[in-house]
Image (cartoon, rainbow, N blue to C red):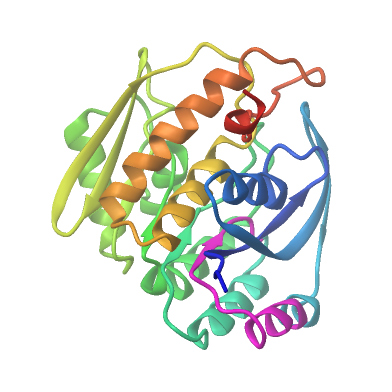
Amino acid sequence: MKAYKTVLTIAGSDSSGGAGIQADIKTFAALECYGLSIITALTAQNTTGVNAIYPLSKQCITAQFMSIATDISIDAVKIGMLGSAETIRTVAALIRNLKGSPPIILDTVLASSGGTPLLPSEAISILKKELFPIASIITPNLPEAALLTGMKHSHLTPQAIEETALKLLEAGPSSVLVKGGHNEGDECCDCLLYDNRFFWFSSKKIATGNTHGTGCTLSSAIAAFMARGKTTEIAVANAKSYINEALLAGAAYRLGNGSGPLHHLFRLWQ
């Protein structure tokens, strides 16, 4: 019998399907992995923004986790929106007891792409204390990196981005990917600090208004490739290639009145 490569996502639900759990599951499927999910919060949102957030209880999150972990082996874990200090502590405790020590990909979700706060500022220190030390890789964008380190975010030079990555690494993760898409210019330059080396991934920015769920999708793609046994460096490189293609394919579509989604399953629609 064949065995699926499995990826567990622990994140919030996006009712519009472009980000969160829904984007994660689509990404896993597109990259030949079987997606499992634990929902931390329900959101009422669409392409124009987040209208309401309904956190789930510690008991609900724990019950979801135990149902999966006692039955199905997990090859990688992606963590997205958590929403509160209590949820952070709950997820950290559950992950520490997970069998097999799968890679943990932590997307440091602090706010939506539209600016809606998704984690209270007082919970940021808890995120760093509880989850950074058990993360195989964290994937903050530049504004998130600034909040996590206390460094100012403006147009950062490559040297400043590397310094930011080093400061984030001090908090305990095995590797750090600082995403540079918020920098000015027509190039998206991401910096990976892994195995005491810096790796830079540069690509031309794609002219599209459909960027909803980009961060969720990238971290999920990294998780999928790591579940399939790729090293961190190769997983990030492959994930970057996938997301660029998904952005390019999604640019041809229109959904809703705001920022639409990527085309996660473009390979199957050709």
From this view, report whether residue 22 is shown above or below residue 227.
Answer: above
Residue 108 or residue 38, whichever sits in front: 38
Say how many tags the image has.
Answer: 0
Residue 222 or residue 182, whichever sits in front: 222
Residue 206 or residue 108, whichever sits in front: 206
Residue 135 magenta-highlighted: no
Does residue 155 appear left or right of residue 49 in this picture? left
Q: Quadrant of residue 254?
A: top right
Residue 188: percent from left, percent from top: 36, 24
Q: Residue at x 63, y 83 (%)?
A: 69
Quadrant where the C terminus is found in the figure = top right
What is the residue that sits farthest to the left in this orientation?
197
Query: Is any part of residue 175 visible from this angle?
Result: yes
Q: Residue at x 22, y 28 (%)?
A: 157
From this view, report whether residue 155 is shown above or below residue 1.
Answer: above
From this view, report whether residue 257 is shown above or below residue 91.
Answer: above
Does residue 33 appear left or right of residue 203 in this picture? right
Residue 231: percent from left, percent from top: 28, 57
From this view, report whether residue 122 is shown above or below residue 151.
Answer: below
What segment carries the magenta color?
Answer: 63-82
Quadrant where the N terminus is found in the figure = bottom right
Q: Residue at x 74, y 63 (%)?
A: 39
Residue 260: percent from left, percent from top: 71, 24
Does residue 10 appear left or right of residue 13 in this picture? left
Residue 266: percent from left, percent from top: 61, 28
Query: Is any part of residue 117 visible from this angle?
Result: no
Q: Quadrant of residue 253?
A: top right
Residue 76 magenta-highlighted: yes
Q: Residue at x 13, y 57 (%)?
A: 196
